[in-house]
Image: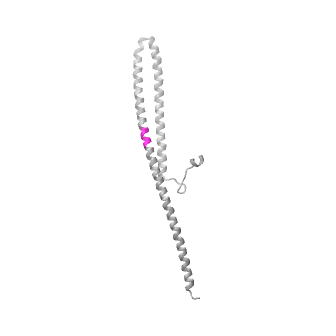
Amino acid sequence: MAEYLNQRVVEDGGRQKDGEMQNGIRLCRIVAVSFGLLCVLQVTLNISLRLAGKCYQSSVINQTQPERRGQDDTCKDQLALERDQVRAERDQLEAERVQLNTERDQLKMERDQVKMERDQLNREREQLNRDRDHLNRERDHLNRERDQLGANCRPG
């Protein structure tokens, strides 16, 4: 059953429709942008934690050396600045995540609408095929009747 779920249904002689392809490309772009933003956030956190470790080491040293306490304040200011930057990036990423989720939901709704339209067109096509077949049978029947009447009316 897993093989069936993973198989792509292709119609129209093996060609995908442009809208489906664009939706797939758009989704790939969304995933790539999200992944890139997460990488940027990870790098920022790594740098911040490394600097925090250095500041912690320098504060331990400063406890024994009072003349270096001014460096502690600089380190604390730097950490506070980086903390604020990371928070701003986090907020930006959160807003982008919400936007991407909204776009994803919209694409799902559009996909469902297209599926419903496709199903309706398939039903109409099937009805037209049935009507055509009925008309062909009726034509064949009328041709046979004409031929029989023509055969009966010939002098012979």
Determine whether 5 is above or below 150 in the image: above
Q: Position of residue 105 (x, y in %)?
A: 44, 45
Q: Is residue 138 above or below residue 98?
A: below
Q: Is residue 40 above or below residue 20?
A: above
In this rendering, the answer to whether 62 lies above or below 39 is above
Name the residue at 44% across, 38% down: 97
In the picture, which quadrant includes the C terminus? bottom right
Q: Is 69 placed left or right of 122 in the picture?
A: left
Residue 55 position, x and y percent, is: 45, 19
Colour scheme of this structure image? one colour
Residue 47 part of the magenta-drawn span? no
Q: Residue at x 47, y 42 (%)?
A: 29
Q: Quadrant of residue 151?
A: bottom right
Q: Please name the residue shown 43% across and 44% down the image.
A: 103
**Range of magenta residues:** 96-102
Foreground residue, 151 or 59?
Answer: 151
Residue 153 drawn at (x, y percent)? 55, 86
With 147 as the anchor, is 102 left or right in this view?
left
